[in-house]
Image (spheres, rainbow, N blue to C red):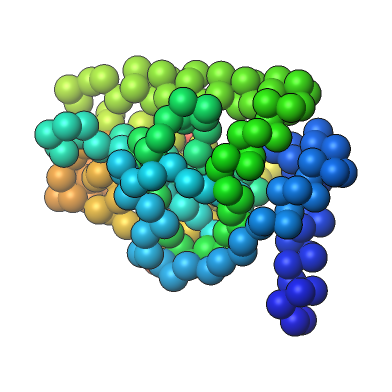
Amino acid sequence: MNRMDELEKYRKIIRQQEEFASFTDNEFEQLAQQMQVKTFAKGQVLFDQGDPRTRFYYVLDGVVRLERVDETGSFPFINYVSPHKAFPYRGMFVGETYTYAAMAMTAITIASFPMPVFEKLLRDNKQMMVCLISQMGQIIDDDENRLQRMVTSSATHRVKQALMLIAEDLGTQDESETTQIPYPITLKEVARVSGTTRETAGQVVSKLVDEGVVVYQHKNFQFNPELLT
């Protein structure tokens, strides 16, 4: 498949997604003409917190890790963007810089569009504005929920909650209600999400494995979330 065919394939995929479906054909054409599709290796940085907010991204394949830290750099707030989801919504219309850093957690293929063009088209399309408000409302609800679930002095509880949050972002559930996370998750990653040390995260995970609550093989997690509550 040549480059033009590949771009057309991605363009058709994106056109059908919720973030773009309500644009008119003319509006989407304006956006698609300036679409860029790039690949990033695992660990590559798309942008840092505080960089100029110039692009709107849509994940085609792989996982993007978003991390925001406080002024001391001590307390990270981590989210994941899985395939067929867009970011950033935070700062839409008002922000001049990215409020978090974005890094390829796996090898990724990602489309992006100029932020000024995307914002202008949103302003001109009421249906898309409703979709945007809905998306932002969901993000606020999710973030508040994450904070509430992590406000505890129990490291064990935070590690369990971290596993559940990662599963909610990236996991898939089978008929037996077992959730599998089809991406490698290191103990260091669990530690960062839970605000614990790697040693503590490792001890908690090992105990959960010994109890038969969690399966952790080759950095892949599998568990029933109800057993972690």
Q: Residue at x 36, y 64 (%)?
A: 43
- Front-most of 170 and 133? 133
Q: Would you place residue 40 above or below residue 17 in this image?
A: below
| Residue 8 lies in quadrant | bottom right
Q: How many marks?
A: 0
Q: Percent position (x, y) of residue 126?
A: 76, 21
**Quarter placement of the C terminus:** top left
Asked which quadrant contains residue 179, the reply is top right
Viewed as shown, does residue 22 lie left or right of 178? right
Residue at 30%, 41% in the rendered image: 50
- Residue found 56% across the figure and 24% down from its top: 136
Which residue is located at x 44 percent, y 70 percent? 41
185 sits to left or right of 181: left
Looking at this view, is 223 or 38 the one in front?
38
Furthest-right residue in this view: 25
Q: Residue furthest bottom?
A: 2
Residue 210 in view: no
Left or right: 17 as drawn, with respect to 48: right
Q: Position of residue 6 (x, y in %)?
A: 74, 72
Q: Tell me if I can see residue 12 in this picture.
A: yes
Quadrant (top left/top right/bottom left/bottom right) for the N terminus:
bottom right
Report x, y in % for residue 176: 64, 41
From the top left corner, tell me how far across and down residue 196 is, in percent.
18, 39
Comparing 212 with 136, the one in front is 136
